[in-house]
Image: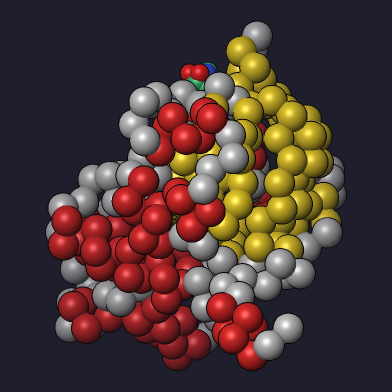
Amino acid sequence: MNDMSILERSVDQSDIKITARDVQVHYGDKHAIKDVSVELLDKTVTAFIGPSGCGKSTFLRCLNRMNDTIDICRVSGRIALDGEDIYDKRVDPVQLRAKVGMVFQKPNPFPKSIYDNVAYGPRIHGLARNRAELDEIVEKSLRGAALWNEVKDRLADPGTGLSGGQQQRLCIARAVATQPEVLLMDEPCSALDPIATGQVEELIDQLRSEFSVVIVTHSMQQAARVSQKTAFFHLGNLVEYDDTDEIFTNPRDPRTESYISGRIG
Ligand SMILES: Nc1ncnc2c1ncn2[C@@H]1O[C@H](COP(=O)(O)OP(=O)(O)OP(=O)(O)O)[C@@H](O)[C@H]1O
């Protein structure tokens, strides 16, 4: 391998963070995810794309057991984080969700101060021994979410008083504050204007230096801009998973080709 090919290699294939094997999801009789196997890489942004109802959000929610909260939902197969089965009965889902954080479509700050929104997770998980350490985590998380400069003089103000884009960055700070290893984002920009979307996309790119990021998006432009890997879902199947460039320029499956060229969706 010459130096150039080393420079051009965008992701380290050996660094697998999450492994899913033969995952099936049912909501009652509805078979929403069909036999999905995939390996998601560390320090990489992976985009889940596909037509509405194809199962992107359902599969994303399997990765931190958010589907446990839906009574009729059954998940089978194996999903491992760093080789450990996250569905093992000894795994506490609350601890798991601190490691595998989530940001939702609509910004959903708690009805609390900006400070307390970020401090909430570290407090319940006992990550700070005293107020000074908590202050440090809050500042670091808000800096990490590119929000610190905008809010540092009004940390006691309610989080709900921020703009939509700022609220979404506050939710990212809240997720980052529990020192997660993976960040799941379910259409995080769909409620944001183009400027706020640009800021969150830039942030996603920075977050990838520390975390594995998985993002569900309806925007193929967004997937192309922010991700290094893309998974295309169709009718509950994972049809194609590859480098983002490959998916968009050289898709192997005709269903992927149809979707990215706008013929299905
Ligand atoms: N809580 C639920 N109860 C019953 N069925 C559900 C539930 N959530 C999702 N489904 C069904 O599972 C399938 C996959 O839905 P999911 O929301 O994962 O798709 P998606 O690709 O994320 O869609 P969209 O892009 O529209 O958000 C759909 O047929 C949907 O109706």
Which residue of the protein is positioned furthest toward the top in this rendering?
A: 29
Q: Nearer the viewer, residue 118 or 187?
A: 187
**Left or right: where does residue 182 sit relative to residue 116?**
right
Residue 169 image-quadrant placement: bottom left
Q: Quadrant of residue 20?
A: top right
Task: Report whether residue 181 is seen.
Answer: no
**As rendered, which of 162 and 54 lies closer to the eye?**
54
Please provide percent x and percent y for residue 92.
Answer: 73, 51
Placement of the N terminus among the 4 image quadrants? bottom right
Q: Is residue 77 left or right of residue 130?
A: right
Vertical placement of residue 255 versus 40, above or below: above
Number of numbered discs overlaid on the protein picture: 0
Image-quadrant location for residue 178: bottom right
Q: Position of residue 116 (x, y in %)?
A: 36, 67
Residue 263 in view (yes/no) = yes
Q: Quadrant of the C terminus?
A: top left
43 in relation to 63, above or below = below
Residue 53 is situated, as x and y percent measured from the top left of the image, at: 46, 24
User: Measuring 63% from the left and 81% from the top, which residue is drawn there?
Assistant: 5
Q: Residue at x 57, y 57 (%)?
A: 243
